[in-house]
Image (cartoon, rainbow, N blue to C red):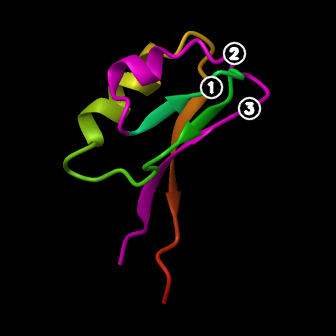
Amino acid sequence: MAGKRNVIVDYGLCEANAVCMGVNPEIFHVDDDDHLTILKPDVTADTEEDIDQAVRRCPRQALSIVEVDAPD
């Protein structure tokens, strides 16, 4: 069985420009201290298009999608 996919952030690259939050604030949140939180990291049929767009539009290329092992 294939693993699931998650969106992750490289905090060393992230400048909290909030472009991702502009794409979908239900998935990405940048707080008043300029810290990005990924609220819904799972890539699902409902979130895939927005996550793909956020990854492509990130000015620092700090977002990526990774395969994760599904729990047994």
Badge 3: how crowded within 10 Å, few (<14), some, or many (20+)?
A: few
Is residue 33 toward the left or the right of residue 50 in the image? right
User: In terms of sequence position, does the residue under pointer 1 or pointer 2 come before the other?
Assistant: 2
Q: Are marks 1 and 2 in contact (CB under 8 Å)?
A: yes
Is residue 11 toward the left or the right of residue 25 in the image? right
* Residue drawn at (41%, 24%) of the image: 54
Q: Quadrant of the N terminus?
A: bottom left
Tag 3: residue type? Tyr
Q: CA distance from mark 1 to mark 3?
A: 7 Å
* Residue drawn at (79%, 27%) of the image: 12
On the image, the x and y values in percent for residue 47 come to 27, 43
Q: CA distance from mark 2 to mark 3?
A: 8 Å
**Residue hosting label 2:** 15
Q: CA distance from mark 1 to mark 2?
A: 8 Å
Q: Is residue 31 above or below residue 70?
A: above
**Residue hosting label 3:** 11
On the image, the x and y values in percent for residue 35 come to 68, 29
In the rendered structure, which segment of residues is drawn in magenta? 1-26
